[in-house]
Image (cartoon, helix red, strand yellow):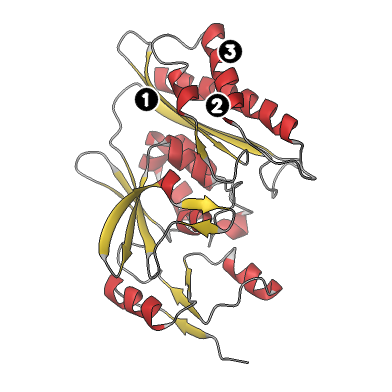
Amino acid sequence: MAELQYLAPESVDEAVKALASAPGARVLAGGTDLIVQMRAGRAKPAAVIDVKRVPGAVGVWRQVDGAFVIGAATPAAEIGEHAALTATWPGVVEAANLIGSTQVQGRASLGGNLCNASPAADSVPALVAARAVCVVVGPAGKREVPVEAVQAGPGRTTLHPGEFVLEFRLPPRGQRASDAYLRLIPRTEMDIAVVGAGVNLTLAADGKISEAHVALGAVAPTTLLASSAGAAIVGGALDDAALARLDAAACAACNPISDKRGTSEYRTRIAGVLARRAAKIAYDRARGVS
């Protein structure tokens, strides 16, 4: 049996070189998925590249323009404790706080949650709705990729060989804007989402919705940016008619499977319900009601 290599590079260049020198290597951001897969024999990497020592991979920063940067290996627990991020992007923090248990959140990261490429990943719909981008680094240098473009299917990403996600960037936030994330699970906690819904809204001065983004999880092979669902509520208040349009558009965007956690019909119906509920929460937050 070949010996497993463990490498902990301390710079982007070192990390890129480490990935290049060990074909079949896997990046360890938090390890809460990777270690479980290795113990079960589903993952057998030649090397594990721990990126937590790479500058920029861990931490949360607010930039001069108001944008937030979240290191891809930042523990979810640290994200949940960041007061300014929580006030500005509560939906993103809500989603991070739903990854596993309290103990798991001490290790689990947004980068790992995204690159594990589960259609049911909790943090991904919230990041997609927030219009977050990934900073990806690799042999060809640095590039920015919308979060929704990273997953290619269950367990697969669009990252090129030798690349890894270094950080996430959330855009500057104006006034009268907020977001929310909701999921449905069979149990009260520690379960995989049957459906997840993230909604991000911006209101005009007159209270009408000027911008809306809706993302759905566990209803397709990858997280869906349901553009038609966001467009369905732009231009007016979030009244019953707007919610009905949102529900219908969210359902129409779905292409789920049936499994032991729910039929495709059930998932489709729940997607509309959760989109409506998350939109109400985001709308009230944007108005300063809650």
- For label 2, the residue is 278
The residue under the point 59% across, 54% down is 154
The residue under the point 66% across, 71% down is 42
Helix, strand or loop at label 2? It is helix
The answer to whether marks 3 and 1 mark residues whose Cβ atoms lie closer than 8 Å is: no
Q: Quadrant of residue 162?
A: bottom left
Q: Quadrant of the N terminus?
A: bottom right
Instruction: Residue 177: give its label.
Output: 1
Residue most extreme to the left: 64
Marks 1 and 2 sit apart, C-alpha to C-alpha, by: 14 Å
Q: Residues within 10 Å of mark 3 (few under 14, many from 20)?
A: some
The residue under the point 69% across, 26% down is 269
Question: Horizontally, is 164 left or right of 112 in the view?
Answer: left
Q: Amino acid at mark 3?
A: Ala
Q: Amino acid at mark 1?
A: Ala
Q: From this view, report whether residue 57 is shown above or below residue 49.
A: above
Helix, strand or loop at label 1? It is strand
User: Percent from the top left, x then y, of residue 146?
Assistant: 37, 45
Q: Nearer the viewer, residue 286 or 138?
A: 138
Q: Nearer the viewer, residue 268 or 165?
A: 268
Q: Amino acid at mark 2?
A: Ala
User: Percent from the top left, x then y, of residue 137?
Assistant: 31, 63
User: Percent from the top left, x then y, of residue 57?
Assistant: 36, 62
